[in-house]
Image (tube, rainbow, N blue to C red):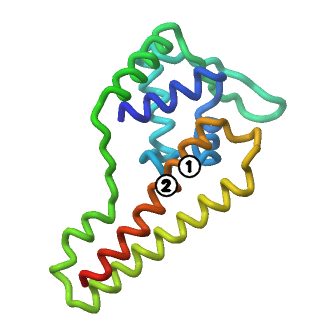
Amino acid sequence: MRTIDLIVLGILKKESLSAYDIQKLVEYQNISQWVKVSTPTIYKKMLQLEKQGYVKSTAKKNGKMPEKAVYSLTKKGKTEFEKLMLGIAARPINIFLDFNAVILNLDSLAPADQKACISIIEANVKKMTSQLQDSLADNPNSTNLPATGKAVMQQQLFLFEAIEKWIKSVREGF
């Protein structure tokens, strides 16, 4: 969950936003593809971070819209952001891929089902590779996506291209 803290604090370091706007930004930048974060998590996280003194909320009204809480980073929040940046960067890198649980258990299935599972994973990998290629091709100089977001998308593309090659070798073993 510290990763989610880092994401939220990092977003708020750039600008004050409501929980809804943070969630929309997370969706727009496809952050949830790289880090498990859901809409309820964002709302709960905002309350938790405020309770810890890392963010403060201000009630804002925009026209006839209902009042909403807009969050900004406190001095304590800026310190925590920097602490998380250095702490998380120093940790060993773990790449958790859900489908590895399927790969580990393939030998518990009939051969036809093993091949079906591998084919499904392979199709999903190809789909993600294609989506990332399209996103990077469509927006090579887009000002909407920061350079850091593009860097993560490029990293994900390299990872999916490597997994695509790897899954072919797995297929040969089954």
- Give the crowd class for mark 2: few <14, some 14-19, many >=20 residues within 10 Å: some
Label 1 with label 2: CB-CB less than 8 Å: yes
Residue sitting farthest toward the bottom: 112
Q: Is residue 119 above or below residue 86?
A: below
Residue sitting farthest toward the left: 108
The percent position of residue 27, horizontal first and vertical second, equals 60, 48
Nearest the eye: 163 or 114: 163
Cα–Cα span, label 1 and label 2? 6 Å
**Secondary structure beneath disc 1?**
helix
Q: Is residue 85 above or below residue 112?
A: above
**Secondary structure beneath disc 2?**
helix
Quadrant assignment, res 12:
top right
Q: What's the amino acid at mark 1?
A: Gln
Q: Is residue 73 above or below residue 67?
A: above
Q: In the rendered view, does 86 fall on the left or right side of 132?
A: left
Residue at which label 1 appears: 154
Q: In the rendered view, does 153 fall on the left or right side of 122?
A: right
Residue sitting farthest toward the top: 75
Image quarter of the N terminus: top left
Q: What's the amino acid at mark 2?
A: Phe
Quadrant assignment, res 14:
top right
Q: State the residue at coordinates (58%, 19%).
A: 57
Residue 12 tag number: none
Residue at which label 2 appears: 158
Nearest the eye: 151 or 112: 151
Nearest the eye: 73 or 102: 102
Quadrant assignment, res 111:
bottom left
Q: State the residue at coordinates (54%, 26%).
A: 10
The percent position of residue 45, horizontal first and vertical second, equals 45, 32
Nearest the eye: 8 or 120: 120
Q: State the residue at coordinates (67%, 61%).
A: 134
The percent position of residue 46, horizontal first and vertical second, equals 49, 29
